[in-house]
Image (spheres, rainbow, N blue to C red):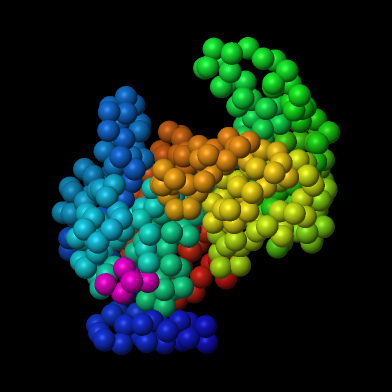
Amino acid sequence: MAMKRVAVSAFQALSSSSSSSSPLTRHLHASAGSKKIVGVFYKANDYAKLNPNFVGCAEGALGIRDWLESQGHQYIVTDDKEGPGCELEKHIPDLEVLITTPFHPAYVTAERIKRAKNLKLVLTAGIGSDHVDLNAAAAAGLTVAEVTGSNVVSVAEDELMRILILVRNFVPGHHQVINGDWNVAGIAYRAYDLEGKTVGTVGAGRIGKLLLQRLKPFNCNLLYHDRLKMDSELEKEIGAKFEEDLDTMLPKCDIVVINMPLTDKTRGMFDKERIAKCKKGVLFVNNARGAIMDTQAVVDACSNGHIAGYSGDVWYPQPAPKDHPWRYMPNQAMTPHISGTTIDAQLRYADGVKDMLNRYFKGEDFPAQNYIVKEGELASQYR
């Protein structure tokens, strides 16, 4: 309760010019009547027509437009989310629900929250809500929720793929084919087997555990660092060893996989000094959040060979600007943010968003694991 009072006081100080924005007025559940709901998703253009299950794009709109409009709600969908004249800004003053996605995030800043007098609910279509200023959301009395578990299999599979791509030095070989070359030595001199390598995951939540389970058949040495130790039976089943101290684990690893949320504590965690603690020639996979890494430190380590390969699909900001240095650094196998937005994942998180909206309209609670901010308090992983 003390934490909640502090959060409320902080937001009241932020919004002292308007008493109408008190967090006590932003109720958890919807009132009767039509709601203005805004969705922000990536644009698919012609690709939207190629798969009827492509619901995660702006054109697909999570497949809930007819359902919402049949109930009298206003549903506005856009991909235009940045800058003072963007489409999203036009709706900030009177939207009640904002739906966005980690793959094309609408950044819900403290300033936007202050101006969104009618905003009550922010939903993430997927997992990972760090695009929201969670402290400001908590202080404002907003509810922030995501579709927990909706794309964990998708991301874990993608991480395994990236590990293999780096270990086998796949990207240069693919480029040779495209460029009309044939130089086996230029690939083989740094291609290895995954068997026998030490893989450490920094974070062993839902995705981290799934990755470790998928790595077990490769006969790797599996390590994990997390704030919580696994159940001993699960740990034995997976064959993974707990490392309480991160900096002790890192020098042991041939491959480091980032599987933690972006929080105030993890932002910039892998800076020049921490990367230097890894063994020379380490491989990194990061499908968590780009801002966990110090951007320039990664560039420098890839350039001097301390990092022999870096792969991931997360950047900061997103979409990544054309001059983002990770686009041009050596020894990288980067992609846009795609790991958690497979068609299967889209269908799962679309269903999850619809379920939470339905509960919101009915005044029912969400599944407990979906809450990121509830009644002025942050979920434990974001504290």
Residue 107 placement: quadrant: bottom left
**Horizontal and vertical percent for residue 131?**
43, 59
Is residue 261 visible to the viewer in this orientation of the structure?
no
**Horizontal and vertical percent for residue 361?**
29, 60
Please report the residue visible at 59 percent of the width from the left and 13 percent of the height from the top: 181
Residue 351 shown left or right of residue 255 in the figure: left
Q: Per the image, is 98 magenta? A: no
Residue closest to the eye, 168 or 231: 168
Residue 142 shown left or right of residue 297 in the figure: left
Please report the residue visible at 56 percent of the width from the left and 15 percent of the height from the top: 177
Is residue 91 visible to the viewer in this orientation of the structure?
yes
Residue 297 shown left or right of residue 253 in the figure: left
**Horizontal and vertical percent for residue 257?**
67, 46
Compared with 353, 186 (above or below) is above
Q: Which residues are magenta?
A: 110-115
Please report the residue visible at 61 percent of the width from the left and 67 percent of the height from the top: 265
Residue 341 shown left or right of residue 308 in the figure: left
Residue 267 placement: quadrant: bottom right
**Horizontal and vertical percent for residue 235?**
78, 49
Q: Per the image, is 114 magenta? A: yes
Please report the residue visible at 80 percent of the width from the left and 30 percent of the height from the top: 195
Q: What secondary structure is the stretch in magenta mostly built from?
A: helix
